[in-house]
Amino acid sequence: MDSQLYYLCGFGGPALALIFAFILTRKINAADPGNERMQKIAAQIRKGAMAFLKTEYTILLGFVAIMFCALFFGLGEDGSRTALAFLVGAVSSAVAGWVGMRTATGAAVRTTNAAKTSLLDALRIAFSSGAVMGLTVVALGTLGIALLFFLFGGLDGQTALKASESIFGFSLGASSIALFARVGGGIFTKAADVGADLVGKVEAGIPEDDPRNPAVIADNVGDNVGDVAGMGADLFESYVGCIISAIALALALNAGRITELWGFTLETDAVDALKGHLSLFPIILAGAGIFASIVGTFFVKTNDEKHVHAALFRGLLVASVIVLAAAYGLTTVMDIPIKVFWSVIAGLAAGVAIGQVTEYYTSKDRGPVHRIAQQCETGAATNIIAGLGTGMISTAVPVLIICASIFFSYEWCGLYGIAIAAVGMLSTLGISLGVDAYGPVADNAGGIAEMSECPPEVRQRTDSLDAVGNTTAAVGKGFAIGSAALTAMALFASFRTEAQKAMDAVILDGGSFKSVLTDLELTNVNVIIGLLIGGMLPFLFSALTMGAVGRAANKMIEEVRRQFRTIPGLMEGKAEPDSETCVAISTRAALREMILPGVMAVVSPLAVGFIFGTAGLAGLLAGSLVSGVMLAIMMANAGGAWDNAKKYIEDGHHGGKGSEPHKAAVIGDTVGDPFKDTSGPSLNILLKLMAIVSVVFVPVIVAAMKS
């Protein structure tokens, strides 16, 4: 029965998702793209987005080649399989980003044109585009893991453990692409956004997405490379990381731990059988989540602009209920302890709860955003103070939710339970990522409506979709942070397990160590050093990415000012701006500035591991997890709150557009842009990438620690 479910969910589910994504893409492409002016603008956006992605992937080819060789030649006899898994993971992540980008850039103009008819038609196209991204991510992630685990002998109890160790390379490949995609895309989009807002809206006093603004096309390109390809890569690596960790932690269980957790004693054969069931469960559950996500998409529909959010939430709720029913059925059919099902509930409930808390702090209909808007009455300084305070206080409840999820899932199923909670949280990623990725499409649709001078009701409908998209994007970032925390915790547990196995192997071969360096004891100076370095790294990483946005934005501001000053008739609407130069500025800056943060994420754990041993490396992972999660939540929520405070004022409150409070709100939003779209989201990947690098290379580090 297990193998049948494995083939059905591990291969059948992804195949169905890819077929359904293809059907949705055909329907999107069949929709009317509008008049010639709309198509011209959309073509500029698509050309810039795809050119950026092509150049970024070309640069990443060198990094992938270096890492492939390091794994192939550096990990001994298992290096070839890990290197192969790494390559498959990197390619899968890149393909998912490419598909999502092409779909989004084609869907935006069709969403604009559909908004001429009705809100429902516009929502259908925008959400379908997001669903293509979500389903492609989960399909390639689940299929890659299922295929590699099968090829490496994971279905054979004798070779399953070795197979689980090798497929960590898949997670490493996904994480590597994700970090560069998130950082590069974030720098691109925020450099353009800051330049467009500060010069266009504050200095020149022209509306958002005004066709006279040279940076508007670059801003719309950035929405795609940052919030579509970047977010997709981020959640892709969380998705595969937690599944692979759950597999490895299941196979690391022993009879004593099983008795301690679930209260029954098993013979050796029965222990091996249970470990086999537990190792296949996360892959099968992920496949069930794919089926649930497909069903959920059919429930996303409304023709009332006030019910757009409810329609999206209804689809997610339906998928979640189906996943819970499937998880319960799987624990029964596969003869797995019922507490595993409880861990799934803990993860899924934590994801929903974090999303609701994030919505409270970032929605323009809630008190925190209203209070920030009120502070704009006295200028930009008080606005920024209020936004920072909101971001800081917003860390409390999500952290407590994450702690509760970790506590209960560990009590029920040990370290395996934490990984399963993460799998549960991301089990509906096919639709939850669709809900998130629809936001940038709606945003681009509004920009195209403004630049092509569509009737006012068209922009009103796209703005209704975009306003909900801002909230779903903030919720998506909260979801990503929560899943990153659980995934990083699961990877940390995997690191401890792999470190101990590597040390046991050395001892078995007659080797020895000067001291036991796997225990996290605060009396161990190496642990303290690792904790401090790990706690510092998220701040250093954020400083690098924030500085990169600032430098790129500076060049963008100068270019926009130059064009306003030197192009005759531009401000009167009688001349066309030079948008390609602005796109080129963002592209060059993003590709140049993403290198240092990306290399730092890979090199830091290796350097600490070789200098301070596995104890120092364990400290680094623990320290980075604590400070990184807090900083990521604070930055994402503060940025989202500043953004919606600006939109709240633009709706007519506190003086409306063009007022002094509005100018203060634009400045606050500009500060928040790199918070929520560059540094904050990138921290999720930093935590997971450092953890997976540690897991993969720990045998080499242990070998260097021998006496």
Image (cartoon, rainbow, N blue to C red):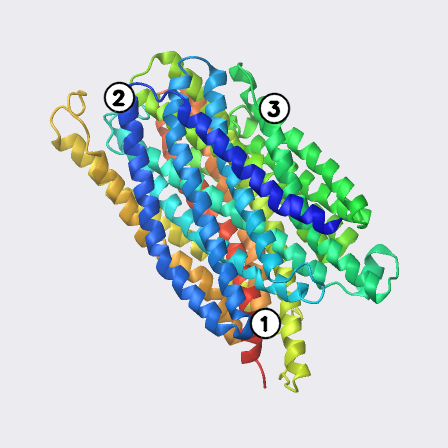
Check disc 2 and report its element: helix, strand or loop: helix
The Cα atoms of the two marked residues, 3 and 2, are separated by 34 Å
Which residue type carries mark 3?
Answer: Phe
* Amino acid, disc 2: Arg
Residue at image coords 43%, 57%: 540
Proximity of marks 1 and 2: CB atoms separated by less than 8 Å: no
**In the foreground, 138 or 152:** 152
How crowded pointer 2 is (Cα within 10 Å; few <14, some 14-19, many 20+) is rated as few
Of mark 1 and mark 2, the one earlier in the sequence is 2
Residue 633 placement (x, y as % from top left): 54, 44
**Residue sitting nearer the eye, 538 or 681:** 681
706 relative position to 557: left or right: right
User: Disc 1 versus disc 2: distance between alpha carbons?
Assistant: 60 Å
The reply to whether discs 3 and 1 touch (Cβ–Cβ < 8 Å) is: no
Is any part of residue 671 visible from this angle?
Answer: no
Q: Element type at marker 3?
A: loop
Amino acid tagged 1: Thr
Q: Quadrant of the C terminus?
A: bottom right
Left or right, residue 599 beside residue 479:
left
Work out whether residue 446 can be spotted.
Answer: yes
Q: In the rendered image, which quarter is residue 252 located in? A: bottom right
Marked residue nearer the N-terminal end (3 or 1): 3
Q: Earlier in the sequence, mark 3 or mark 2?
A: 2
Establish if 287 lies above or below 275: above
Tell me how far mark 3 sits from mark 1, CA to CA.
49 Å
Q: Which mark is residue 299?
A: 3
In the rendered image, residue 619, in percent from the top left (x then y), is placed at 59, 65
Disc 1 marks which residue? 614
Identified at 71% across, 58% down, the residue is: 250
Image spot of residue 37 (x, y percent):
26, 21
Q: Label 2: which residue?
A: 37
